[in-house]
Image (spheres, rainbow, N blue to C red):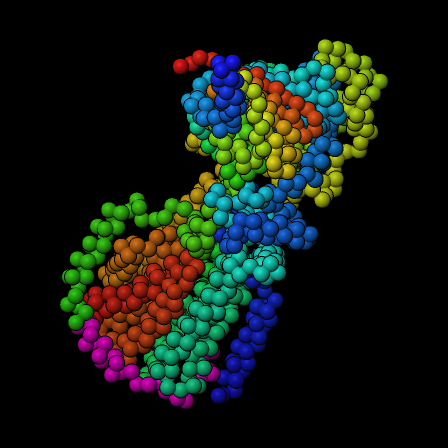
Amino acid sequence: MTRDGKRTFLLWLLAMLAGAAIVWNSRFTADMSFFLPARPTAEQQVLVDQLKEGAVARLLMVAIEGSDATQRAAQSRELRGRLGKMPEFAAVQNGEAGSLDADRDFLFRHRYLLSPAVTPERFTVDGLRTAISDSIDRLASPAGMMLKPMLARDPSGELFELLRQLNPGAQPNTRAGVWASPDGERALLLLQTRAQGADTDGQEAAIATVRAEFAAIAAAAGIADARLQLSGPGLFAVKSRATIKSEVTRLSAIGTLAIITVLFFVYRSLRLLTLGLLPVLSGALAGVVAVSLAYGTVFGITVGFGSALIGEAVDYSIYYFVQSGRSGVAAWKTRFWPTIRLGVLTSVCGFGALLFSGFPGLAQLGLYALTGIATAAIVTRFVLPRVADGGAKPRDLSRIGTALQNAMAILRRLRWPTLALALAATTYLALHHDRLWSPNLSVLSSVSRADAELDTALRADLGTSDSRFMVVVRGADREAALQAAERAGQTLDRLLANGSIDGYDSPARFLPSSAAQAARRASLPAAEELRPRLQAALADSPLAAGKLEGFIADVAAARQAPDLERASLDGSGLGLAVDALLLQRPDGWSAVLPLRLPAGDPAVASIAVRQALAGSGALVIDLKGEFNQLYNDYLHEAVLLALAGLAAIVALLAITLRSTRRLAAVLLPLVLAVLLVIAALHLGGERLHLLHLVGMLLIVAVGSNYALFFDRAAGQLEADTLASMAVANLTTAIGFGTLGLSQVPVLHAIGVTVGPGAVLALLLAAMFVPRETAA
Amino acid sequence: MKRFFAGLLLLALALPASAAFDVGQLMNDLARNPGGKAKFVEKKFIALLDKPVVSTGELSYNAPDRLEKRTLTPKPETLRLDRETLSIERERQKLTINLGNQPEALAFVDSLRGTLTGNRAALEKSYLLHLSGTPDKWVLTLLPSDEKIAAFVQRIVVAGNRNQIRSIEYLQADGDRSLMLIEALDAR
């Protein structure tokens, strides 16, 4: 190595070390923020908040199977007993009798501050008469009989007012005293983790705790066939992170190993192999560094894309070693480098288009690949020649090249059949164009079908709704948000009364605003006023006023009671309910009011809610709709970006090639490759989504590299140049093809599109070489 | 004298015959009732109240599984029992409970349905039965044999004539009592 070479190598090493230091300190994540919008609308922000912090995201459903109903119930009780004491769980429910007593006691104790029915009118003689007579009438019903023991202290029925707001709906079945599936074959529990949905580590720890405790219980009871089934958003997050983690390592290893094998066959030298990997290493590192610096957090999926990057970036050193082998480095720089540079630029255009995506994962992939490829090319051009200078030469590939030249002649005969096939593919795509793309975001989720089915089954068993529709109100502080929730609640009460909705939840139900609590407190008369009013109200009633001293004492106590605060709810399940519905945002507080809509088309019911709340500043949100809207926005944007990327590539080529004919010759094989790949994928039953669309752009961006060589050869394409292209193409196909093995839909889609697409691009470029340049 | 003895013998023969009105025979009679509609008046005697709470409405029964109690006063409410599903509708709220998995509640509800259908086996699973009176005026007392049911109810007394039930009285565990008087509406 020359002095110049050493200096260059040292500089490169320093840069690599600096990069490694940045990567070491980078934050890596495999959570769903990959998919969440970078620039959310107000509605989408609610969706994001719900996924990250909402109650639904902290829900774990547990099913106990095996053994018999009595044993399952015993295990359910034991599990609840153990988990309920643990700080990881905010709530553990299994339908056991008495499990909700604490909550009911709380409601009863604070009924005069909580009940929306508490108004000054209710404590007048007439108001008392009506309320107490209603309470007595309710005793005729089995439902009202449950309130009988409370009658003397709560004759106006405030507890009833509180309980009837809660969803009686469909409670899960019970068997042997605990919740069970309708067929009784599995006992069910519902857990709420303390960890937020976005805290995948916390979710993982909570899930591990559930499994460990259950295993201990089953072992202690000596039950061999006891099984635990778990589902919920947290489990999905943990599972997909594990999938991504294992795939990043597995796919990179497979890809790298295969590529190294190919390279070793070509280079026949450990030194050349090592040198050949310099640009790749540099590119992979630079990619992560760029993403880390630009976004702060690196997604696991982005790193998983590394295998494709390696396959693509290694091309440049292959070109360098094979092509400079005969003609020398100086000639390579003048003859081949401009073509390679143009190829790099088209790739950069393709990946660069993704940078503008509002889909954060896509933007990261774009930045990662773009930086990686550019770095690899720059290292190949400016570092490699100085460091490598002379030494071992790679295997002479001219025999392979000659064979390939002969193969090209055969390929050319397939021109017409290929065009016919492309026409068929075009027709097929045109006929299916409206059914080509999957219309919802779930195609991007890495949740397996079995897991999704179990989730649906458990949800049905437990009767947990998807909480699809919700009203969201905001306020500068907690009090303002609660007051806004109370105002929205009044509107919703009217809709409830006329049957437009079946019910709703509100954080203000258990934690009323200070204003509402003050108003209720002020509605309560002093004992010396209440007593004569009761006498008058109950003159003809079967309930003698003299038996209601407990009521008078409770009202007097409530007049002195301090405001309920969030801390007052600690230790009951209600605190958790409030936390889930009352979120602190950077710009204030949001209160979430989930809606229960009547059976039938929910869209119709949600329109009534929207109309009623119009102008109040409340947002009415359909989470499922928002999800689909989000995906459609992404898809729409991806179409625009792909077109913009394509336009940039075409413009770049047009400016450089300065000939319509040459431009057409370069583009034709790429367009054909895209058509054939997409038609084949759809025909093969692959559910196409926006990452396939991105893959189409990448076929053009990556495939153009090969077409350009044929263009630049302008006459004879030498045997070893052809061979270098074949090898480079093979490594690219391996790199992307490895992604095709992935279970992560994002990576899989790019892999199965670009892998075959790159190979086809080379074959078609060889097939459609213009006559005068044909070999 | 001979005739007297013959009469005495007849009487002696006849005595077991009238005593032969037992639970089995009552159940057979009841099982022959295909169902129909009835008016009811229910009085609940509650310790805290000076007067009973009175509710009225209609009962309808379709052998063997469907029973509906439609309360009209003081507040409309519909209670429906279909096989093992109990639903309560009141003030636009509906609650559905599957009793199949709640044996105690089912046993309680079945005290009425078991009597209506003459299902002796179902009744004897949870209650000790004691019958007195004649086919024209019988009283069937059900005493819970299971502690869990005894937590709901101490004693159930059903009275009737032939295959018609006239009244049902529930004596609750806390000492409160409800009495339902039933008057068949001749629907058939």
Task: Specify the quadrant of the image occupied by residue A662.
Answer: bottom left
- Which residue sits furthest right? A528
- Which residue sits furthest front? B1
Does residue A401 appear to the left or right of A62 in the view shown? Answer: left
Residue at coordinates 43% horizontally, 59% vertically from top-left? A744
Residue A189 sits above or below residue A301 on the image: above
Residue at coordinates 51% horizontally, 59% vertically from top-left? A225
Q: Which of A355 and B148 is in front in this view?
A: B148
How many numbered dots are placed on residues in this image?
0
Residue at coordinates 38% horizontally, 65% vertically from top-left? A741
Task: Specify the quadrant of the image occupied by residue A589.
Answer: top right
Residue A597 point in image, percent of width and height: 50, 32
Residue A368 point in image, percent of width and height: 48, 63
Residue at coordinates 46% horizontally, 60% vertically from top-left? A365
Does residue B16 appear to the left or right of A137 in the view shown? Answer: left
Q: Which of A491 and A535 is in front in this view?
A: A535
Q: Can residue B182 be seen in this view?
A: yes
Does residue A528 appear to the left or right of A759 in the view shown? Answer: right
Residue B56 point in image, percent of width and height: 57, 15
* Magenta stretch secondary structure, dominant: helix
The residue stretch that appears in magenta: A383-409
Q: Does A633 lie within the magenta span?
A: no
Q: Does A406 lie within the magenta span?
A: yes
Q: Nearer the viewer, residue A478 or A154?
A: A154
Q: Which of B11 and A419 is in front in this view?
A: B11
Q: Is residue A124 visible?
A: no
The quadrant the C terminus of chain A occupies is: bottom left
Residue A352 point in image, percent of width and height: 43, 58
